[in-house]
Amino acid sequence: MNHAEPFVFYTELRLVALTGLRASNLAELLNHLGEVPGSSIFYHTHHMYLAHHFETPSFSNDFALWVSEALQEEALGERLAAIDLLSFTSIRQLREAVIATIERHIKADGPRLRQCPPGDEFHFCRSKSFLLSTSLIARDPEEFFKVLPLVSKASVFFHFFGARLRLGRPGNDFSQWLRARGRQGLASAIEALDPYSMTLDEFKERVIALGNKRS
């Protein structure tokens, strides 16, 4: 994104496919975590936030949900759910954090590995993204916050959730663009929001409220 240009809102379509890899216990899950593509790690840690429109998911990622429900390893499920996704700026870091959490649990729990019931295996998926420009454009910060209520959840997801991992640094597309236009305070206030603690609708409303308050 060229920050000197008007802000063009993009949306993202994802084609999800099975990788053919599956796990029935923690050892298999751990082994596949190291070899699946980065798009698989992103999908299994983020897709719930786009899928849940009206409530924040009780588990922050598929790994936590499967470990807790299929393997009945609730303590590990809680630790995986507690991984702070906002603290990572690359898929590599996120992958390593998930792997390290599971490795610590296996080391502490010993060689015993629970098997999931037949049919409850973890199936690794991967996703391919297709970016599409929307018809929504903002030429200045004031217009940006007039347009934002019309922006879809998928577009907000792309510009905020994916941006950190795409840019490889803390931040998001909204704040990067606003900061380039001298709105440092507003950009920092948006960056301080935790999008993982609320629904996308709630998050968008919070961003809009910040823009209206500081306009």
Image (cartoon, rainbow, N blue to C red):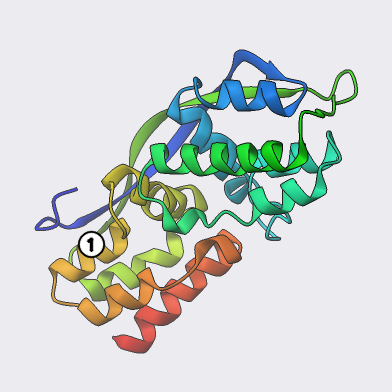
Q: Nearer the viewer, residue 80 or 41?
A: 80
Asked if residue 52 shows in the view, the reply is no
Q: What is the residue that sits farthest to the left in this orientation?
A: 4
Residue ID at (20%, 77%):
183
Where's residue 207, x and y in %? 43, 72
Could you say whether the residue bearing mark 1 is in a helix, strand or loop?
Answer: helix
Q: Amino acid at mark 1?
A: Gln
Q: Classify the position of the C terminus by image quarter.
A: bottom left
Q: Nearer the viewer, residue 165 or 206?
A: 165
Residue ID at (71%, 60%):
55
Crowding at label 1, few (<14), some or many (≥20) Cα neighbours within 10 Å? Answer: some
Q: For this view, does 85 lie left or right of residue 109?
A: left
Where's residue 137, x and y in %? 26, 56
Q: Which residue is mark 1?
A: 176
The total of numbered circles placed on residues is: 1
Corner quadrant of residue 7: bottom left
> Relative to 209, does residue 9 appear above or below in the rendering?
above
Q: What is the residue that sits farthest to the right in this orientation?
A: 117
Q: Nearer the viewer, residue 4 or 142?
A: 4
Residue ID at (64%, 51%):
60
Where's residue 156, x and y in %? 44, 55
Where's residue 203, x and y in %? 52, 67
Q: Nearer the viewer, residue 172 or 90?
A: 90
Residue ID at (35%, 79%):
211
